[in-house]
Amino acid sequence: MRIVLIKYAHAKINSMKSRGLGDTIEKVTKATGIKKVVNAVSKATGKPCGCAERRDSLNRKFPYNNK
């Protein structure tokens, strides 16, 4: 069952096109479950994680120039 879930997550991640490093990091955190933990901690503490801003900043600083 675990292999099927990993293959599904891998296929889902590959279907999204990364604009830069921020998108790639977001994909990795989603696939590994880190994003769920961060969201839970953010909700419990009442503090925003800043994930979207960090992703956008990294995309601007390290774009992949996919054309």
Image (cartoon, helix red, strand yellow):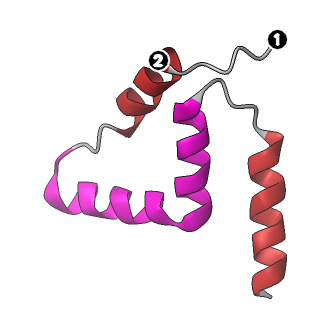
* Pointer 1 residue: 67
Dots 1, 2 in contact, CB < 8 A: no
Q: Residue at x 45, y 26 (%)?
A: 58
Query: What span is colored magenta in the figure?
Result: 21-47
CA distance for labels 1 and 2: 17 Å
Disc 2 marks a residue whose amino acid type is Lys
Q: Residue at x 74, y 49 (%)?
A: 13
Query: Does residue 15 appear to the left or right of 54 in the view shown?
Result: right
* Pointer 2 residue: 61
Q: Residues within 10 Å of mark 1 (few under 14, many from 20)?
A: few
**Residue sitting nearer the eye, 27 or 48:** 27
Q: Quadrant of residue 34?
A: bottom left
Q: Earlier in the sequence, mark 1 or mark 2?
A: 2
x, y (%) of residue 10? 78, 59
Q: Quadrant of the C terminus?
A: top right
**Residue sitting nearer the eye, 20 or 1:** 20
Position of 61 relative to 27 (above/below):
above
Which numbered marker is on residue 57? Answer: none
The stretch drawn in magenta includes residue 45: yes
Label 1: state its secondary structure: loop
Query: Does residue 50 appear to the left or right of 14 in the view shown?
Result: left
x, y (%) of residue 44? 20, 63
Position of 32 relative to 3 (above/below):
above
Q: Residue at x 26, y 62 (%)?
A: 41
x, y (%) of residue 5? 77, 75
Position of 12 relative to 54 (above/below):
below
x, y (%) of residue 48? 24, 42
Type of secondary structure dominating the magenta stretch? helix
**Residue sitting nearer the eye, 45 or 61:** 61
Disc 1 marks a residue whose amino acid type is Lys
